[in-house]
Image: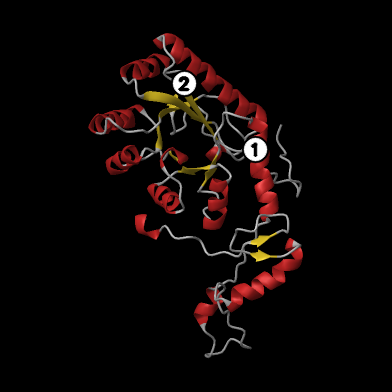
């Protein structure tokens, strides 16, 4: 909900190598600091008071049985190193955005913005949360697959990067784009590169029956859309996340880049000047190693 964009309460434990502009508990060793962090969380009321009385008689607070103390810990040094490794791997000319769906913590997102990262938002609530944290205009990538008319107009008026999921939504965007001709928004069309599935079917969005994006084999309709709307200047692709190997991810990006070049050749001008690739490396579920288990 729009009014519920609150910062998630959490304890952030940082290593000594991390930056010191976080509201955090600064300890030289993350593991050693966990007991102290839990104690602080309990003292500040961040953790519920779970009933510890003996027995299960009438004096027991049954609601207390449902409350579970939870501690959320981040090694900010390792987290920041991962962000910078991503930037280094891609080099100049790329803008990276952190997905709010995977981490909406205010202090961490503010730090990401300070490092030059944007905010990728899949809902209007995430957009509002990102804006409250300082992300503005093109720093916000809004790519919900089911936007309302009010959300589309809001994005255009605020100059957000807006990714369009399908032809029906494209027509709605066109209507509001005409009403907001001075919009600074980058407008992308999400393509399904049909690169294949990963091991987790629910997270594989590059297959023929995916409900997201326009299948890349609908080439004539896609080319005509770019011809009709000269403000459509971005190609967006999201191959998948969990269970996707590097080869499938790269294959999907390659097909979309080639298609973007084909669009410009078809139009005889460099209309598509932004390429937006989404997705992520898979988690290694097989071990505690930090490297991916997929090739």
* Callout 1 crowding tier (Cα within 10 Å): few <14, some 14–19, many ≥20: few
SS class of the residue under badge 1?
Answer: helix
Look at the picture and state if 192 lies above or below 138.
above
Quarter placement of the N terminus: bottom left
Q: Nearer the viewer, residue 71 or 95?
A: 95
Residue at (66, 27) in percent of width and height = 247
Residue at (42, 57) in percent of width and height = 5
Residue on which disc 1 sits: 86
| 204 relative position to 156: left or right | right
Instruction: Give the percent coordinates (x, y) of residue 177.
Output: 28, 31
| 131 relative position to 93: left or right | left
Residue 283 visible, this orientation? no
Q: Residue 216 got which mark? A: 2
Look at the picture and state if 134 lies above or below 198.
below
Look at the picture and state if 252 lies above or below 45.
above
SS class of the residue under badge 2?
Answer: loop
Instruction: Give the percent coordinates (x, y) of residue 238.
Output: 52, 32
Residue 33 visible, this orientation? yes
Determine whether label 2 and label 1 are within 8 Å by CB. no
Which of the two discs, 2 and 1, sits closer to the camera?
1
């Amino acid at each position: 909900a729009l009014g519920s964009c609150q910062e998630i309460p959490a304890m952030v434990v940082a290593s000594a190598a991390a930056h010191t502009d976080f509201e955090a508990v600064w300890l030289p060793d993350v593991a050693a600091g966990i007991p102290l962090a839990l104690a602080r969380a309990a003292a500040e009321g961040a953790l519920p008071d779970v009933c510890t009385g003996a027995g299960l008689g009438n004096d027991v607070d049954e609601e207390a049985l449902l409350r579970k103390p939870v501690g959320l810990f981040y090694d900010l040094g390792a987290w920041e190193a991962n962000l910078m490794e991503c930037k280094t791997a891609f080099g100049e000319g790329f803008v990276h955005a952190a997905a709010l769906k995977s981490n909406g913590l205010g202090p961490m997102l503010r730090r990401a913005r300070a490092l030059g990262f944007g905010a990728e938002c899949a809902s209007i609530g995430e957009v509002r949360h990102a804006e409250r944290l300082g992300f503005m205009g093109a720093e916000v990538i809004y790519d919900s697959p089911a936007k309302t008319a009010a959300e589309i107009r809001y994005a255009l008026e605020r100059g957000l990067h807006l990714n369009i999921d399908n032809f029906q939504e494209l027509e709605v965007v066109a209507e509001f784009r005409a009403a907001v001709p001075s919009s600074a928004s980058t407008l992308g069309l999400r393509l399904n590169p049909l690169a294949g599935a990963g091991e987790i079917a629910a997270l594989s969005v590059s297959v023929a029956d995916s409900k997201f994006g326009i299948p890349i084999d609908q080439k004539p309709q896609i080319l005509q859309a770019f011809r009709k709307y000269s403000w459509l200047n971005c190609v967006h692709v999201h191959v998948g996340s969990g269970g996707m190997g590097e080869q499938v991810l790269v294959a999907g990006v390659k097909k979309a880049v080639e298609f973007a070049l084909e669009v410009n050749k078809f139009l005889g001008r460099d209309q598509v000047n932004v390429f937006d690739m989404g997705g992520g490396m898979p988690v290694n579920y097989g071990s505690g190693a930090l490297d991916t288990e997929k090739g």
